[in-house]
Image: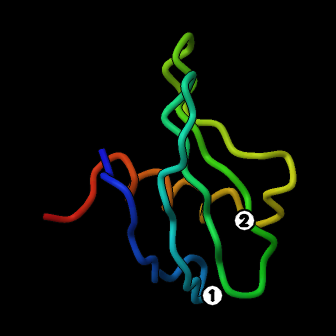
Amino acid sequence: MLENYSTLQFIVRGKIFKGFCMRIQDDFHETYAVVLDGYHSFCIWLDNKSEKWCASKNAAIDPDAIDEIISRISFPAS
């Protein structure tokens, strides 16, 4: 899993996404704040019960972009 901070830059469906994600203190979930250029910030967290990643309801971006962020959080490049 991602330690504390990671820059993000990727392309989904021809659109470039740039920003960063940062692990935030949460006693209940593994939680990350995501900030992308041109979008409102949102959170992504790993639900302990279902073991599935979730995103804030206000994450108004392409679901494929959220999946890309989750894959980078789950399996960061070495």
Q: Earlier in the sequence, mark 2 or mark 1?
A: 1
Q: Is residue 32 left or right of residue 63?
A: left
Image quarter hosting the N terminus: top left
Q: Are marks 2 and 1 in contact (CB under 8 Å)?
A: yes
Image point (37%, 57%), residue name: 4
Residue wearing tag 1: 15
Secondary structure under the numbered disc 1 in the rendered image? strand
Q: Is residue 69 left or right of residue 33?
A: left
Which kind of residue does numbered mark 1 sit on?
Lys
Which kind of residue does numbered mark 2 sit on?
Asp
Image point (60%, 79%), residue name: 13
Residue 8 lies in what quarter of the image? Answer: bottom left
Classify 20 as above or below 37.
Answer: above
Secondary structure under the numbered disc 2 in the rendered image? loop
Mark 2 Cα-neighbour bin, 10 Å: few <14, some 14–19, many ≥20:
few
Classify 20 as above or below 26.
Answer: below
Q: Position of residue 30 (x, y in %)?
A: 48, 35
